[in-house]
Image: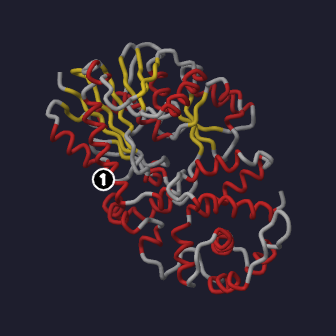
Amino acid sequence: MTPAARLAATAELIAAIEEQPRRPADATANDWFRARRFIGGGDRRVIAERTWAIVRQRIRLDWHLDRVNAEPTARLLVAVHLMLAEGVTLQAIDQAFPGGQYALNQLDRSERRVLSGIAGRQLIHPGMDEAVRLNIPDWLLPDFQERFGDSLAAESAAMDQPAPLDLRANLLRGTREEAITSLAAEGIEAAPTRYSPWGLRVAERKPVTATTAFKDGLIEIQDEGSQLIALLADARPGMRVADYCAGAGGKTLAMAATMGNRGHIVACDTSVPRLDGAAKRLHRAGVHNAERHLLISGDKWIKRRAKQFDRVLVDAPCTGTGTWRRNPDARLRTTPTDLAELAAMQHEILDRAAELVRAGGRLIYATCSLLRTENEAQMERFLGAHAGFVPVPLADLWTTLRPDVPPPGEGPWLALSPARHGSDGFFAAVLERRA
């Protein structure tokens, strides 16, 4: 594709995302690319990277357009991003919109007026209020200020960057060193992660799903923070484990590996497609000790299996504020109503899942959120209502699990962030039912 054709495709994809503002942008993008299989891998990568860059800076781009009384059309979003984020001049943008087949139509008089009014500015403008400058929705700024205090600027800058590519070596198929060697043989350099004993980080975006290591189940794509949640679960051989909100099974896979395929693990979810996706991953990874269970309304499964599990992991549905590097559209999709509804859902899920934990067993609560409402506040509420559970402090767990590595923070809970830990933002709490 020509550079002009790539820009036209970017604008088309942006428009498709705009048409479904409540749908995750990655789902829209997957459908869009699937319908255009003629787009080659290199072109696809350029289009996707520019699209996510525009989505990531949408709050700031809207601010600039609002100052010149312009509506954020897909064409203008592409053009303004070129000007403010990529340093392209108005004259060069004119040339990038040449008209004709496979290219964007020429700029009209109104669009030139808008771009002329913005020309010469910086993406981050001194006239912006704090929320826009930090690229955080207004209503969430107080929560982020409470969480990060003086380090908020550094954390917001880290969340502005694309996430690295993290992998997990599957111990059922081989060691981390064998995974590094296998990837290197196909031209992909991977280095051990800082905290996870199974983690690998690839510096550049590479097509790892085409490698022998991935096809043979030696590696899985998984953020280091997500791996640490599975580490803190401390699922051991012979245990009975429930992954209560398993989704596509990433943490099920990790726990099955720490169990050495011995014992029993149940991957639960309310979605058939997600569980079907998990089944494919379990097969590729060589997991033999897992089964799937579909949670439905009126299900008696919890009652029949009350107090039978050594470990119950609740990776709860949440706002995903810790994953903005990967899902930048969540900045704009999430509303105060969403947060309230999710907090209520987390409350209910925790209460139900707790019934499964045996005496002496552990309940692990996790989110990919940075918000106190979804994290510490949920723990305070749960512990206040369930006297039979006590916290297992992070320091005690870490000393047992990774004595050779300093723990990723202080306090009773795991709380990860992009700037401090280089991972997505995750929270995890481990609670033990008194014997």
Residue placed farthest to the front in the image?
A: 298
Residue lying at 83% horizontally and 73% vertically, measured from the top left: 98
Give the answer, above or below, for where 409 lies relative to 66: above
Q: Is residue 391 left or right of residue 124?
A: left
Give percent across and percent down for residue 44.
73, 51
Question: Looking at the image, can residue 122 be seen?
Answer: yes
Residue lying at 71% horizontally and 83% vertically, measured from the top left: 112
Give whichever of 374, 413 is nearer the camera: 374
Give percent across and percent down for residue 101.
85, 65
Q: Is residue 91 left or right of residue 173?
A: right
Give whichever of 64, 99 is nearer the camera: 99
Q: Which residue is mark 1?
A: 372
Give percent across and percent down for residue 308.
28, 18
Residue lying at 48% horizontally and 62% vertically, measured from the top left: 332
* Quarter of the view holding residue 380: top left
How many marks can you see? 1
- The colour style of the image is secondary structure
Residue lying at 49% horizontally and 49% vertically, measured from the top left: 422
Give percent across and percent down for residue 16.
63, 58
Give the answer, above or below, for where 234 lies relative to 134: above
Give the answer, above or below, for where 262 lies relative to 300: above
Give whichever of 422, 159 is nearer the camera: 159
Which class describes the residues within 10 Å of circle 1: few (<14), some (14-19), or many (20+)?
A: some
Q: Quadrant of the N terminus?
A: bottom right
Q: Quadrant of the C terminus?
A: top left
Question: Looking at the image, can residue 197 be seen?
Answer: no
Give the answer, above or below, for where 256 lies relative to 68: above
Q: Is residue 366 left or right of residue 134?
A: left
Q: Secondary structure at mark 1?
A: helix
The type of residue carrying mark 1 is Arg
